[in-house]
Image (spheres, rainbow, N blue to C red):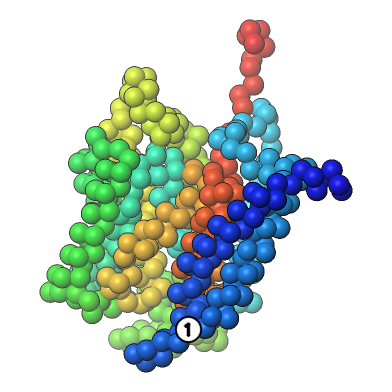
């Protein structure tokens, strides 16, 4: 114990503690200490003192611990070396198939035991899973930083609303059409930015997202402007899920002779959405192992080398933009059906930032990580409604902690190695 104590640099620990105290004072001073009272404010110094004291004490203990032998061993786990793609041995069999089977069983039981609130939260989580999977193709696999991804989400949602109002289209016909419209918009965005990289690409895509939002907000004669548009409820084989069907039709529960359940609409949306998410997961899993998926990853790692190998970088980029955008368009249709109403305030830059955070926190290119991060970043805010004033602060703290603890995301990309055939020199 004495050997560990002698290895502690007290001066360094005190400097770390002082710096942490100053940062805590800057952060918690305005948030915890200042309480608005009409047009004036009251300053609660005791709250600030306690908050800063707790932070300083915790930082001193952490700094002292990290200088011990156990602390150095613990901190070595966060070494960034080898934090890229993990290559598994040839013939490796993942246990994910059993976890996937368990998820399917839980998903099948959920509608029978969950109330309306839980169903709506899970639906929202699945929508963000779709959005995260789509952006993961663009950012995680192809390495194209897209800050206007929410525009494709809005195209899908408004595609359902406008299609119903002007063309009489319903939920089922809107899903493929929204995917095609969003993919077409992705191609339109992809062509001008083929030569752009990094910050320039991010700025252009951010501008595209804002253009779509402003068009939706100001073209009142078509989109309803800030007032938004109503969206019809989904139907199954023409059967509606309300207590009474419109125009003298037969409701779903009467046709099948079951008791009326006000949650039937959400159960239906949840069921279809879960099937779509599982389909997209399978397709993305196959794409990443096809030449197209390998081309995306080659483009992400080094575009010059990618082009030198003979790959058509134009088609590779456009395919990433279009497939990612089509996934967002489908998610937009489910969001509009779930809400029953759409307006431009649902498609701000914060949504794009949230979807990007899902990709970054889950792991760039990692499918399982994106699914976990999507539920964490959508379900946790619902559980923290009592701390609504501090949700953005907690979100920022989570981002900082993740960038220190897991800079490559929750789950890194795994690739199964290829066995060398017999007779080939190793």
- Location of residue 329 (image quadrant): bottom left
The one of 199 and 304 positioned closer to us in this rendering: 199
Q: Residue 77 placed where, x, y %?
A: 68, 42
**Drawn side of residue 425 relative to residue 375, left or right:** right
Residue shown at 58%/59% (left/top)? 18
- Location of residue 314 (image quadrant): top left
**Drawn side of residue 189 relative to residue 55, left or right:** left
How crowded pointer 1 is (Cα within 10 Å; few <14, some 14-19, many 20+) is rated as: some
Asked which secondary structure carries label 1, the reply is: strand
In this rendering, is residue 205 above or below 252?
above
Q: Which residue is mark 1?
A: 43
Q: How many numbered marks does the figure carry?
A: 1
Residue shown at 41%/34% (left/top)? 300
Q: Residue 95 placed where, x, y %?
A: 70, 45
**Drawn side of residue 390 relative to residue 203, left or right:** right
The one of 278 and 211 positioned closer to us in this rendering: 211
């Amino acid at each position: 114990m004495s050997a560990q104590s002698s290895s502690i640099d007290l001066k360094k620990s005190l400097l770390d503690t002082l710096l942490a105290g100053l940062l805590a004072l800057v952060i918690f001073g305005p948030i915890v200490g200042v309480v608005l009272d009409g047009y004036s404010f009251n300053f609660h110094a005791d709250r600030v003192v306690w908050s800063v004291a707790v932070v300083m004490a915790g930082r001193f203990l952490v700094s002292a611990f990290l200088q011990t032998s156990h602390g150095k061993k613990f901190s070595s786990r966060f070494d960034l070396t080898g934090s890229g793609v993990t290559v598994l041995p040839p013939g490796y069999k993942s246990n994910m198939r059993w976890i996937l089977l368990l998820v399917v069983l839980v998903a099948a039981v959920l509608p029978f035991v969950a109330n309306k609130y839980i169903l709506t939260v899970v639906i929202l989580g699945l929508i963000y899973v779709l959005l995260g999977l789509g952006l993961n193709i663009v950012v995680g696999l192809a390495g194209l930083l897209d800050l206007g991804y929410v525009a494709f989400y809005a195209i899908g949602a408004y595609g359902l609303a406008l299609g119903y109002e002007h063309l009489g289209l319903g939920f089922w016909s809107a899903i493929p059409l929204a995917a095609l419209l969003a993919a077409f918009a992705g191609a339109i965005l992809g062509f001008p930015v083929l030569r752009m990289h990094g910050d320039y690409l991010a700025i252009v895509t951010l501008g595209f997202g804002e253009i779509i939002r402003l068009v939706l907000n100001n073209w009142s004669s078509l989109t309803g402007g800030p007032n938004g548009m109503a969206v019809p409820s989904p139907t199954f084989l023409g059967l509606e899920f309300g207590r009474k069907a419109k125009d003298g039709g037969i409701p779903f529960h009467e046709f099948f002779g079951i008791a009326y359940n006000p949650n039937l609409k959400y159960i239906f949306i949840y069921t279809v959405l879960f099937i779509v998410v599982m389909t997209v997961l399978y397709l993305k899993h196959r794409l990443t192992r096809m030449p197209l998926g390998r081309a995306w990853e080659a483009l992400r790692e080094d575009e010059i080398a990618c082009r030198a190998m003979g790959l058509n970088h134009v088609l590779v980029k456009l395919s990433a933009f279009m497939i990612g955008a089509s996934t967002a368009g489908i998610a937009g249709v489910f969001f509009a059906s779930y809400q029953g109403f759409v307006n431009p305030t649902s498609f701000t830059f914060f949504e794009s930032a949230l979807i990007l955070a899902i990709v970054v926190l889950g792991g760039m290119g990692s499918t399982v990580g994106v699914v976990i991060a999507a539920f964490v970043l959508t379900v946790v805010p619902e559980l923290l409604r009592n701390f609504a004033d501090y949700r953005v602060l907690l979100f920022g703290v989570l981002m900082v902690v993740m960038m220190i603890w897991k800079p490559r995301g929750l789950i890194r990309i795994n690739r199964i190695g290829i066995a060398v055939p017999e007779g080939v020199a190793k």
